[in-house]
């Protein structure tokens, strides 16, 4: 038995009625890491331990960031509750311009504001019940100060590039810096990129589902600002609307400093900063899908999701009214492609 103090306990996890199994963890040198990540074998999530991917950012506590992040405006989301459901500004604009017809309305569940770091940290420190919750989500770009840029350049790029080459990923597109309050939740969604999710400070619980569970997770229509997000509220699932959510089977893990979680492209993920665990800091690495993720049959589940997205987009573009998409698809399928 180690006498190391336990870093968190199960009472800090939110309670959901979902069947979950643990995501495996391996040392970064262990060959099983690449076997699990391999696109032609499994392409499943795995936690990579003891790598030095973001070792140069170990010192990124709030004081250090306040001192060195610079005086830029950073993107901060404000929410009245613990959930920070993402929405696409461009799709909101289309609705507000009337491009979707009169029958589509959308209210943003969170406010997106620009904030200087000292203001963000002050609000974090002085936060009390009833205040808006805060979540900083800022791309690491040239607005951050030179010290932070130096730490960024000292990330273990050999490791990341190695994974990129080995697994046929496209280019790195973005590194997002995430600073969350304890208890914050990013509700279940999928991204169209490969993700190395590197935990720097505090603990996050991650619940993942494979792309094959599309039917259990009920994504919003593609035209909708909540495209790629699940319509199911994990806190209070409406089983009459979303009956197949009962069949969802996920994978989960709690990740802490030094852990890197591989979130495969199109895999659903729900992420929560542990309750009563203090703030959390993460940096992710988003990579495009491989250029010639060569088409071989049978197609992979995520490729089928991509096909469905394209068909939906095409129908929306020609029909203009989202209410016409469902009936057309039904007419096309019923009695012809159904038993
Ligand atoms: O950490 C979070 O709250 C969300 C991160 C996420 O969705 C991502 O990196 O793709
Ligand atoms: Fe994501």
Image (spheres, rainbow, N blue to C red):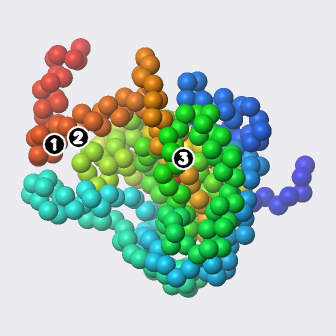
**Relative side of 233 to 93, left or right:** right
Q: Element under label 3?
A: strand
Q: Position of residue 281 (x, y in %)?
A: 61, 65
Some atom of ligand 2 lies within 8 Å of the CB belonging to the residue at label 1: no
Q: CA distance from mark 2 to mark 3?
A: 25 Å
Mark 3 vs 1, N-terminal side: 3
Q: Name above or below for residue 335 compared with residue 54.
A: above
- Crowding at label 3, few (<14), some or many (≥20) Cα neighbours within 10 Å? many
Whether residues under marks 3 and 1 lie with C-beta atoms below 8 angstroms apart, the answer is no
Picture quarter containing residue 151?
bottom right
Mark 2 vs 3, N-terminal side: 3
In the rendered image, which residue does mark 1 sit on? 317
Q: Name above or below for residue 320 compared with residue 75.
A: above
Quarter the C terminus occupies: top left
In the rendered image, which residue does mark 3 sit on? 195
For the image, the number of numbered tags is 3
Visible in this render: residue 256? no
Q: Position of residue 283 (x, y in %)?
A: 59, 59
In the rendered image, which residue does mark 2 sit on? 313
User: In front: 228, or 215?
Assistant: 228
Q: CA distance from mark 3 to mark 1?
A: 30 Å
Q: Name above or below for residue 9 compared with residue 251.
A: below
Q: Residue at x 55, y 43 (%)?
A: 263
Q: Element under label 2?
A: helix
Picture quarter containing residue 326?
top left
Q: CA distance from mark 2 to mark 1?
A: 6 Å
Whether residues under marks 2 and 1 lie with C-beta atoms below 8 angstroms apart, the answer is yes
Q: Name above or below for residue 297 compared with residue 316.
A: above
Q: Element under label 1?
A: helix
Q: Position of residue 19 (x, y in %)?
A: 54, 38
């Amino acid at each position: 038995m180690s006498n190391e103090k336990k870093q968190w306990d199960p009472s800090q996890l939110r309670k959901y009625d979902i069947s979950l199994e643990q995501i495996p963890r391996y040392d970064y040198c262990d060959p099983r890491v690449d076997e699990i990540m391999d696109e032609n074998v499994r392409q499943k999530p795995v936690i990579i331990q003891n790598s030095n991917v973001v070792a140069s950012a170990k010192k990124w506590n709030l004081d250090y960031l306040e001192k060195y992040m610079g005086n830029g405006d950073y993107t901060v989301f404000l929410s009245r509750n613990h959930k920070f459901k993402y929405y696409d500004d461009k799709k909101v604009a289309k609705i507000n311009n009337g491009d979707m017809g009169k029958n589509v309305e959308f209210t943003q569940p969170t406010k997106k504001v620009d904030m200087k770091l000292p203001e963000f940290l002050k609000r974090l420190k002085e936060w009390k019940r009833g205040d808006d919750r805060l979540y900083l989500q800022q791309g690491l770009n040239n607005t951050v100060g030179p010290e932070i840029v130096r730490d960024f350049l000292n990330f273990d790029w050999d490791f990341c590039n190695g994974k990129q080459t080995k697994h046929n990923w496209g280019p790195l597109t973005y590194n997002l810096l995430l600073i969350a309050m304890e208890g914050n939740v990013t509700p279940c969604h999928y991204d169209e990129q490969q993700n190395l999710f590197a935990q720097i400070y505090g603990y996050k619980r991650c619940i993942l589902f494979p792309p094959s569970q599309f039917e259990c997770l009920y994504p919003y229509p593609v035209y909708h600002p909540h495209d790629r997000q699940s319509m199911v509220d994990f806190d209070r699932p409406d089983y009459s609307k979303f009956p197949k959510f009962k069949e969802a089977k996920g994978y989960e893990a709690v990740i802490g400093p030094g852990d890197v979680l591989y979130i495969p492209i199109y895999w659903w993920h729900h992420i929560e900063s542990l309750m009563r665990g203090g703030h959390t800091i993460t940096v992710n690495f988003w990579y495009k899908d491989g250029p010639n993720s060569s088409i071989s049959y049978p197609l992979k589940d995520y490729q089928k999701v991509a096909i469905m997205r394209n068909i939906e987009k095409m129908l929306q573009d020609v029909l203009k009214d989202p209410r016409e998409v469902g009936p057309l698809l039904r007419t096309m399928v019923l009695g012809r492609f159904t038993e």
